[in-house]
Amino acid sequence: MQKNRSGNFFEDFRVGMRIRHATPRTLTEGDRSLYIALTGSRTALGSADTSAARLGLAQRPLEDLLVFNTAFGKTVPDISLNAVANLGYADVRFLAHVYPGDTLSVDSEVIGLKENSNRKSGVVYVRSTASNQRGQEVLSWIRWVMVHKRDHGAACGAAVVPATEPVVPAARLYHGGYSARVREICSVTGVQDLWEDYAPGERIDHLGAMTVNDSDHSIATRLYQNTARAHFDGFAMAAAGGQRLVYGGHVISLCKALSYGGLENALSVLAINGGSHVNPTYAGDTIACATQVVEKLDLGLAHVGALRLRTIGIKNAAASTVVFPPAGDGKPAHPANVVLDLDYTIAMPRRGR
């Protein structure tokens, strides 16, 4: 007769465990409008039906990170309700456009577990997949999250840490079904920079900044039906000696929205290769970011190429102060005001020959 939904603690997970998350979610134009209000997203394809039609799409797709955060939120009650912190992402692939009226369902598999040396928590690795109402996979991702133990003395098995690819290769990227008409995006944005105009090593300082209001990050996290206690339960966080955390996905969305300045003609996010929430963000912090072009990828299309980017988000400082430490096998050394280090790949129209 126990009906207290306390969620899973670290010792409840097993490698190979499969979870079908409740409940399916239909996304609407209302969700898009609220997402824009909370993040300031200005993407060309997501802002106007006329622009989407002009660029050859039958319908205006929803913003990629609205889809990601909504699907992510579905996993929280089963995976990270008792999280200490979400630690990172890998192999995030956007497999199809999602449109208003589509319904998302999400499944996860536990692919790794590693108890922390203090025996109070451990890291859970999961691979999750979101599908639409037709059973078509639209999004797949790996993430790892630190989760409290219910019983600090509970025995846990040997550590299993899954291997992940550092970069999603071009052959595994969904091209978006774009036609040659996407080259007309310059007439929509008024900016002429296309795939050919970016160079590896180039740095872009996004000059905007956004202060995270307490109401904004709370509403955004509720929009995604993310129920993690760390974002909402101020009493519990204070009792643990801390304060409510801003959901990391909201920070990613803010940085993506801010990066419009300098990347105006981006079509969509194709993949998130890896990412870390380096330090926490709290209400009242002001977020700014800078982006470095890591490499240019040829998708085998004359009209669309891909750019692999690294965006670093900081709090309470100007974008011009961002430093890009070498990204190698180890964890990059960041100052305390860095809140996000995100490696991702976008689709960008190209002039072609």
Image (tube, grey):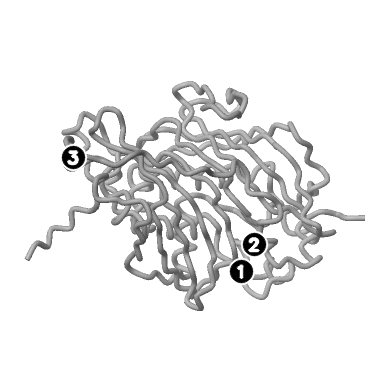
Give the spatial CA distance, label 3 vs label 2. Answer: 50 Å
Residue 285 in the image, given as x and y percentages of width and height: 41, 33
Question: Mark 1 near mark 2, Cβ–Cβ under 8 Å?
Answer: yes
At horizontal 16% and vertical 35% (from top left) the residue drawn is 153
Q: Which residue is mark 1?
A: 60
Give the spatial CA distance, label 1 vs label 2. Answer: 6 Å
Image quarter of residue 326? top right
Q: Which residue is mark 2?
A: 45
Report the amino acid beneath label 2. Answer: Leu
Q: Residue furthest right?
A: 353
Comes first in the chain, label 3 or label 1: 1
Report the amino acid beneath label 3. Answer: Ala
Report the amino acid beneath label 1. Answer: Arg
Q: Which residue is mark 3?
A: 154
Q: Is residue 115 visible?
A: yes
Q: Residues within 10 Å of mark 2 (few under 14, many from 20)?
A: many
At horizontal 42% and vertical 55% (from top left) the residue drawn is 72
Mark 2 falls on what kind of element?
A: helix
Residue 65 in the image, given as x and y percentages of width and height: 52, 54
In this view, the mark in front (3 or 2): 3
Image quarter of residue 236? top left
